[in-house]
Amino acid sequence: MRRRARRFDWHSSFSRPAEPAVLEDVFCNSHGQVWTAAGTMLRGGAWPLPEESARAMAYAPLVDDLAYARGGEAQRNFFHWMAESLPSIARVLDPNAPPQMPIGIMPHPPRFVLESLLLAAREGFSVVRLGDALRVRRLHTVPIGVWSLLHREAHAAMFERMVDRAVAAVPDLPQGDRIFITRADSARRPALNEKMLAAALTQRGYRAVALGAMSLVAQIATIRRARHIVALHGAGLTHLIFAQPGCRVIEIFPASIGMEASRMAMMRLSRVFGHRHITWLEPGPSEVGGRGLSPGDTWNISIQPLLRRLVDAE
């Protein structure tokens, strides 16, 4: 994990701002795939073009300009949407930008997609619901990834606009700047003694929050107020994008051989946004046979050593 962190820092020093591109006369669908009339796949080619998309080309609606925000998992997954797809269309959402072009989204996106667009965009932004096939004269794209977040000038104003609007919408949050992001409301990767950890942290002034049960504005405002965060690894830590720089974070998860790259995502956000991030690894069933953690696998947190490390971090 330390080697991967050093490698990220090394690559960061060579990173360059993403260059916008325009793909002319292409088709796209709700899976985030982009292809030409001749069938050449330009984006999202990990899977073959669905037969229904190929058939729909013959009667696909036509739009002149469209902002590409990917699709499929990139819009269903909170991390991929907030840390990758949304920043890639920041220029379209800028209130001072030229007349706004529509944004391509899935027919039935998760609630957080539209909530985040409402927070980030100027009034009257428009969307186009992507189906099996949509023909676009000019599809406006920006390469995406955590690397693109390194260049704050491209998206900082958008994220600050979201924070300002979220904080203004929920002025009556509970007091305190210490939170514990619980996964008690999730069946994935359950820690058997999470309730014991929550009780111990409560005695030290931490407030347990289940972000999945809150509105997006409340989630953002809660994270913005926090200065000390303890969390089990999960999508909720994507909100480190909105935290005050210098926030102290302890992220807890079971070691998963072969899963290091994806589990490093939240640590990378902290490195980009200037937080003090501690990764706390626990042994887990994933260490048996070199497989990833299955949904039903359980693990335990070494509470007393963790609490001692917490004191050192503060």
Image (cartoon, rainbow, N blue to C red):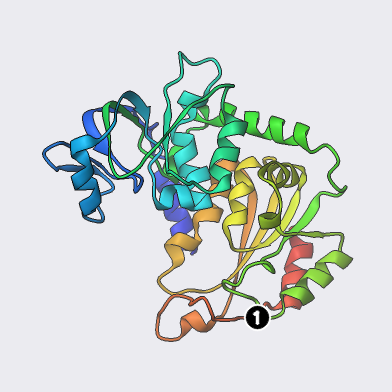
Q: Position of residue 213 (x, y in %)?
A: 70, 56
Q: Nearer the viewer, residue 23 or 257?
A: 23
Instruction: Kindly identify the residue that appears in the image at 39 percent across and 45 percent down.
Output: 71
Q: Position of residue 207 (x, y in %)?
A: 82, 58
> Where 98 falls versus 94 (above or below)?
above
Element assignment for label 1: loop
Q: Nearer the viewer, residue 181 or 121?
A: 121
Q: How many marks?
A: 1
The image quadrant where one finds the C terminus is bottom right
> Where 160 falls versus 260 (above or below)?
above
Instruction: Kindly identify the residue that appears in the image at 67 percent across and 40 percent down.
Output: 245
Image quadrant of residue 65? top left
| 200 sits left or right of 230 in the view | right
Image quadrant of residue 89? top left
Q: Give the residue furthest to the left.
A: 38
| Residue 232 showing in the rendered view | yes
Circle 1 is placed at which residue position? 300
Q: Position of residue 276 (x, y in %)?
A: 65, 51
Q: Position of residue 160 (x, y in %)?
A: 64, 31
Instruction: Kindly identify the residue that appears in the image at 49 percent across and 16 percent down.
Output: 97
Q: Nearer the viewer, residue 310 or 72?
A: 72
Within 10 Å of disc 1 (Cα), the crowding (few <14, some 14-19, many 20+) is some
Residue type at mark 1 is Asn
| 203 sits left or right of 94 in the view | right
